[in-house]
Structures are given as C-alpha cells and as structure tokens.
C-alpha cells in the first residue's frame, strides 16, 4: 500500500480516471463535502451559542436563584386567603440551617424597581431619578460586580458602621459628573442625604434587575435611610455547583411556607426566578445541537462516501479491459486493490478538506458579524481541533472501507475474461 502511495504511475492513473469522469466525480465529491460542511458549521454554531451563554452568565453564579414574598392564595392555620407576606433578615439563617445545599444567601432591598418610585439623586446643578439598592458584600459572590480601577464595592466595614458610601453606574457617572472628572471621592445626594462615591460599576447584562445607572449602598445604611427595619425585598441565593438547583428551589419554598404558616400546596405565596434552571436548559440545548450536528453530518458524509463507492464500481466496470491488461502484464492483486482504495481515500479526503475549509470560512463570517454584539448570546463559533481531526480520520476510514468493494471487484476480474471485453 505504501509503495503504491508514492508510485508516480499510480497517481497518473488515478487523475486520469478522475478526468475521464469529471462531472460524476464532482457531484460525488460535493455530496461528501456537504456532509463535512454541515458537521463543521453546526458544531461551530453550537459552540458559539455555548460561548455566548457562558459570557452572558459569567457574572452570575450558575446555581443561583431569587426568592421574594407575595400573597397567599389558600387559607391556612386560621389565616384567610390574600395575606401579604414580608421576608425578614432572620430568614437567611433559617434557610442556612435547613438547606445545606445553599452556599450563599444575600438579602437585598431596593427603591425604584417593581413599581416603587425611584429616589431623586442630586449633584451640584445636575440631578436624576435612579434605582437604589441596599446590599451586603456577599452579593458579589452570587453576581460579580466589575468595578473600574481605583474604586471598590461595598465592604463589611461599610455595613458595620452604616457608612454613607455608594457605588454608582457608568450612566450615572456620565450624567452627574463632568467628562474628565474622577467621581471617586466625590459626593452625591440621595434622598437629601450626602453619600461619598467609592466605586463605579461596569454594567454587564446576564441576570438580575440591574442597569447601567443603578446605585448600590450598604444594606444597613439603606435600612436606616428608608426605615425598612428588618424587611428584605428579596433574597439572592446560590447553591453549591453539584446541587440540584430545582430541588433546592423547592426546598427553599417549602421551608418558607413552614416558617410563615402557609399552606404546603400554596404555590403563589413565594415567587422565584431560577437562573440555574435556565442555565441547565441552555447547556442541554447546546448538547442537543452538538448531537444533531454529529448525526446529520455523519449521515450526510456516509451518503457521500457510498456515492464514491458507486462511482468507483462504475469506473472499475468501465476499465475492465484496462485492468485485465495490467493483470496480464504482471500487476498483482494487491497492487490493483491498493490503487482502487487509494483513489477512494483520495476523493474522500479531498472532499473532507474542502468541506472543512468552507465550513471554517462560513464560521469566520458569522464570527465577524456577531463579534460586537453584547446583547445577543453568541460569540466565537469555533470547532475544536480534536473534532476536525476526528472528522478527517472518519473520512479516511470510511473511504478505505468503501473502497474495498470496488477494489475486490477489480481483483476478481480474470485477465482472460477482461481481454475478451469489447
């Protein structure tokens, strides 16, 4: 086989055979090319979606969720339907004690969302209405906050001392401060109380309710400023990576129903938004896309390879006399078989490489069109080299196997019978 591979006469015969049947060969190659093209394109598209959603969720813990109180929809324990519930600070420890899968719990309060009026924020002669959040430092364990150089987020000292400090958003900075002015250390007035700016956060979409203009202050300061006491608007929770976030969500609601004397079947008493469930669905969709690309690509490649086998069978039939003469002149069955198999592998590999190049070109165009998109969850649609190597190995293997059929047909031709062919 290796001797045939480097034999000049063998390649001349192969190219001669291809030139005699150009149209038939091109159509067959296109069939294999299309299969590998579909495989590369779909795999790259699935990877682009996977990368896109990773980017969207990069600042939020994978196994995270939000929990808030609503009103009861069922009477229970002497209470009527429609009882309004209110989360409390003590609920955090209550959940920690009963649900070991919970890693982080962050109480949160806010003004300016969910229908509440946004507080007025003033600096010198500039002002605007912005959402204000009261947070603990642990919140950054659940949803990362990207703070520009020179600044920081809320820390524990701010909580303990009820400091009047704040972290503002990019748009807040642009609207309240001059273009070349450093806001760090400056003061703004929130609800007629002066706060010192200690950081500017970069807005990254991907979860929660925040925007690029939000202002974060210590939870304890928020409580004092707006007289909220131990009330909590909602909890941000994160479970350990190996935990079943759907089961954790149900356990959290069950615990809260028990604590607030709510009917066990009342699904409306507590609301929740499960980011972990959404992330798992995205992962499942991505895996489904990869499986689809594999099935469709391999099926199309197989159909194309079968086409190569058919064209070589026709070629062997048309070259019966030529093969007979070669056998009569001393060509061994092994040499004849090697030439046919080599021709099959050559056509398969050529089609495969062309399909890979074409697929990579299409993915490069898609990447260029989506590179600057921050809202659409899609980025860097690439195919791992291991996938490409596996595809080429598959092409060579299938090309060899399918080439055995016409090769055996060629070897079975008896020289005397071939010479009698007209």
Image (cartoon, rainbow, N blue to C red):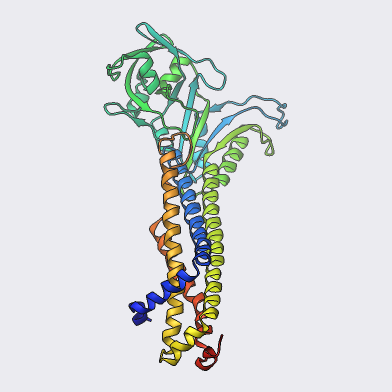
> Residue reaching furthest front?
422
Do we see residue 333 in this rendering?
no
Q: Name the residue rendered at 44%, 34% in the picture.
A: 374
> Residue reaching furthest bottom?
416
Do we see residue 205 in this rendering?
yes
Q: Is residue 322 above or below residue 145?
A: below
- Using the image as rendered, state which of residue 414 and residue 389 is in the foreground: 414
Residue 3 placement (x, y as % from top left) = 34, 82
Q: Where the N terminus falls, by quadrant? A: bottom left
Residue 24 placement (x, y as % from top left) = 53, 66
Q: Name the residue rendered at 60%, 42% in the picture.
A: 250
Residue 157 placement (x, y as % from top left) = 32, 26
Q: Is residue 242 above or below residue 322?
A: above
- Using the image as rendered, state which of residue 252 and residue 393 is in the foreground: 393
- Using the image as rendered, state which of residue 83 and residue 21 is in the foreground: 21
- Using the image as rendered, state which of residue 118 and residue 393 is in the foreground: 393
Residue 363 located left or right of residue 420: left
Q: Name the residue rendered at 47%, 27% in the picture.
A: 210
Residue 135 placement (x, y as % from top left) = 43, 27
Q: Is residue 148 above or below residue 287?
A: above
Quarter of image, res 335: bottom left
Q: Is residue 392 above or below residue 187?
A: below
């Amino acid at each position: 086989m290796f001797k045939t591979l480097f034999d000049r006469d063998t390649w001349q015969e192969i190219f001669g055979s291809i030139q005699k049947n150009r149209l038939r060969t091109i159509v067959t190659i296109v069939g294999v090319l299309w299969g590998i093209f579909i495989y590369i394109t779909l795999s790259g598209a699935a990877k682009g979606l996977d990368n896109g959603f990773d980017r969207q969720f990069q600042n939020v813990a994978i196994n995270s969720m939000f929990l808030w109180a609503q009103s009861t929809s069922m009477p229970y324990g002497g209470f009527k339907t429609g009882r309004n519930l209110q989360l409390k600070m003590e609920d955090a420890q209550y959940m920690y004690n009963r649900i070991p899968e919970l890693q982080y719990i962050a109480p949160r309060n806010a003004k300016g969302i969910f229908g509440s009026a946004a507080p007025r924020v003033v600096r010198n002669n500039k002002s605007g209405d912005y959402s204000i959040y009261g947070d603990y430092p642990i919140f950054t364990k659940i949803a990362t906050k990207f703070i520009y150089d020179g600044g920081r987020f809320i820390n524990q000292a701010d909580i303990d001392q009820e400091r009047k400090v704040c972290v503002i958003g990019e748009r807040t900075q642009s609207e309240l401060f001059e273009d070349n002015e450093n806001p760090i250390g400056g003061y703004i007035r929130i609800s007629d109380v002066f706060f010192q700016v200690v950081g500017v956060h970069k807005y990254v979409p991907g979860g929660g309710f925040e925007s690029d203009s939000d202002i974060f202050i210590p939870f304890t300061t928020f409580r004092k400023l707006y007289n909220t006491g131990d009330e909590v608007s909602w909890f941000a929770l994160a479970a350990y990576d190996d935990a079943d976030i759907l089961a954790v969500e149900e356990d959290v609601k069950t615990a809260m129903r028990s604590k607030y004397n709510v009917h066990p079947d009342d699904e409306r008493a507590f609301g929740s938004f499960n980011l972990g469930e959404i992330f798992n669905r995205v992962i499942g969709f991505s895996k489904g896309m990869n499986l689809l690309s594999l099935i469709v690509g391999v099926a199309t490649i197989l159909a194309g390879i079968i086409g190569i086998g058919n064209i070589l069978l026709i070629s062997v039939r048309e070259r019966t006399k030529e093969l007979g003469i070669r056998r009569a002149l001393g060509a061994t069955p092994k040499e004849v078989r090697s030439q046919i198999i080599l021709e099959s592998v050559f056509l398969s590999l050529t089609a495969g490489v062309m399909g890979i190049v074409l697929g990579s070109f299409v993915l490069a165009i898609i990447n260029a069109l989506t590179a600057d998109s921050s809202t659409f969850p899609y980025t860097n649609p690439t195919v791992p080299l291991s996938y490409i190597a596996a595809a080429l190995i598959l092409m060579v293997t299938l090309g060899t196997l399918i080439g055995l059929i016409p090769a055996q047909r060629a070897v079975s031709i008896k020289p005397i019978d071939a010479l009698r062919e007209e």
